[in-house]
Amino acid sequence: MYKLLGYWFALVTLTVILGFTPGAVTAQTSNEDDSSNGGFMEASFAIAAFDSRFVDAPHHFGNVLNLRFNYQWNGFFIEDKGLKGLGLPGIGYNFYSDPAWSFDMYISEVHTSIRVDDSDTINNEQNGLIGINPRKSDNRFGLRATHYINETSALRLLIAPISDLEHHDTHLALWYGKTWQYFNANLYTTFSAQYDNSKTLNYYYGVSDSEASDKFPVYTAGSGITLGAEFGISYPLATDWVLESSIQFTRLPSSAHNSPIVDPKIESIAQISIVYVLF
């Protein structure tokens, strides 16, 4: 983790040095509370350092290509704002919105799959899990509420009781985000807390009798709260070009990070990226 902090400090320094060069113009940016019809799409090319939660995962340092988008039409929307998003990617319908509050019916993936062919992995991060049975992704339907505290901060709550996995109870998540403007640079931070019951966490981090081995002894995970924090800076380079850097930490609950399939208590990723605004 300390090495990753060192990476990010260097990345932020580079962002600041490049960003505070005179002559930059205002770029198009996304806005969490923009509920009008339309949207945006951005393509980013990032250099990232990644420390996965899984045991025997390689420490990855390399390139990541990504698309971020947000589109609204008559209350319906689809969004994936990447690391800068205040919450999770998903689709939904906004049935109430005013300057202070917004309420959505929302569908999102709250847990990604493990050991399946379409798992979202970086540099084969799950290769150390050979012998562990596949876990499907957990897609949830629920209610999302957002409170805009002021022009620079917002609080978001997700209550998602309906899962496409059998017999899984309610997932609760809370995010707080704040932004600051310093000259033309935009700094932001996001803090999160997500609660899952023992049935959900044991599904992802428990080890059953059928998959137990010398490396993976039988383990039962209990309920717990996953904590997250993200810090970032962005700076417009030209009308459609933005320079960004961020670092993100995820601290698993003790019942998860004590699992034999998990190694570090804190998963982290640091990145610097060039973003092009497609529209």
Image (cartoon, helix red, strand yellow):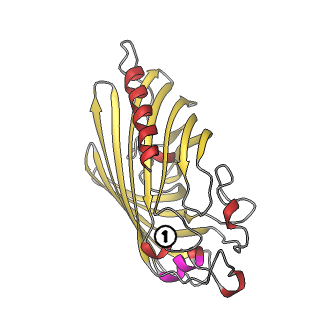
- Tell which of 112 and 50 is nearer to you: 50
Judge whether residue 42 can be spotted in this image: no
Q: Which region shows up in magenta?
A: 198-203
Out of 36 and 152, give the one closest to the viewer.
Answer: 152
Q: Quadrant of the C terminus?
A: top right
Across and down, in percent, residue 144 comes to 42, 63
Is 103 within the magenta?
no
Kind of residue indicated by mark 1 = His
**Which residue sits furthest front?**
214
From the top left corner, tell me how far across and down residue 251 is, in percent: 42, 62
Overall secondary structure of the magenta stretch? Answer: helix
Give the quadrant of residue 36.
top left
Mark 1 closeness class: few <14, some 14–19, many ≥20 residues within 10 Å? some
Q: Does 221 sit above or below residue 264?
A: below
For the point 40% across and 18% down, which residue is it? 25
Q: Residue furthest left?
A: 150
Disc 1 secondary structure class: helix
Q: Position of residue 212 (x, y in %)?
A: 68, 82
From this viewpoint, which residue is outermost toward the right?
117
Q: Is residue 266 above or below residue 16?
A: below
Horizontally, is 215 left or right of 227 in the view?
Answer: right
Given residues 141 and 227, the one toward you in this image is: 227
Which residue appears at 64% of the width and 56% of the height? 125
| 249 displayed left or right of 178 | right
- Of 111 and 70, nearer the camera is 111
Q: Please give the residue where the numbered disc 1 appears in the rendered image.
A: 257
Q: Where residue 230 sits in the image (x, y, percent)?
A: 39, 49
